[in-house]
Image (spheres, helix red, strand yellow):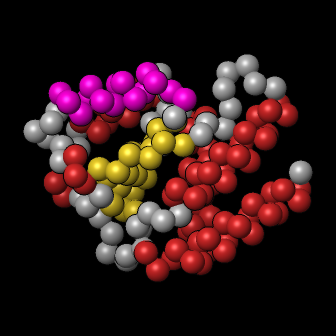
Amino acid sequence: MILLIAILLAFLAVAWLILKSRMHSDSKNLLFVLGSGGHTGEMLYMMEKMDFTRYGRIYIVYSKTDPLSITKLTNFLKERSKTFNLNQMVFIAISRTNEVGDSKRTAVLKTLFALLTTSLKLLALKKLRASYFNGPGVCIPVILVLYLRKVVS
């Protein structure tokens, strides 16, 4: 298990060094991570109050195994099509660290898999002005990858 974590961390460090040149210091990019169920509703409520014309890219991360969040997000954006510029939004589907009812062993393996797949998707993001999180199953790999980006840079 420790060897797997060490390999994952080494991979993340190398990937980060390769992709570091894609980051800009004058960033106006935002990242939102949608949890499942009520967590998505809370995040969409917060997004509704923001003025996105002041920002560059808006990255929206969601769980690919959560169709309810995808439906809520789609409806939210359709209802506010005049408020949001869909061209500035980048949608990123990731794996959850676990599902309700998973055993501890399965949760550990899924977390490692989620970290690996999430890192491949998030390391290439441009520098972020702010990140917003809500919902642990989706947020854990994103937070860890963004933290590693910060430590390595």
Q: Residue at x 38, y 46 (%)?
A: 91
Question: Quick check: can you spot residue 96?
Answer: yes
Q: Position of residue 26 (x, y in %)?
A: 31, 75
Q: Give residue 53's position: percent from left, percent from top.
A: 16, 54
Q: Nearer the viewer, residue 107 or 64?
A: 64
Q: Residue furthest left?
A: 82
The residue sitting at 35% across, 51% down in the picture is 90
Is residue 148 found left or right of 42 in the rendered image?
A: right
Percent position (x, y) of residue 144?
Answer: 63, 54
- The image shows residue 141, relative to residue 37, as above or below, that is below
Residue shown at 67%/54% (left/top)? 116
Q: Is residue 106 magenta?
A: no
- Horizontal side of residue 29 vs 143, given as left or right: left
Of residues 139 and 98, the one nearer the viewer is: 98
Region of the chain picked out in magenta, as a range: 65-79
In the rendered view, tell whether residue 41 sits above or below residue 132. above
Q: Is residue 42 visible?
A: no
Q: Where does the C terminus fall, quadrant-wise? A: bottom right
Give how far across and how far down residue 136 sits, in percent: 59, 36
Judge whether residue 74 is colored magenta.
yes
Query: How would you classify the magenta stretch by its main secondary structure?
Result: helix
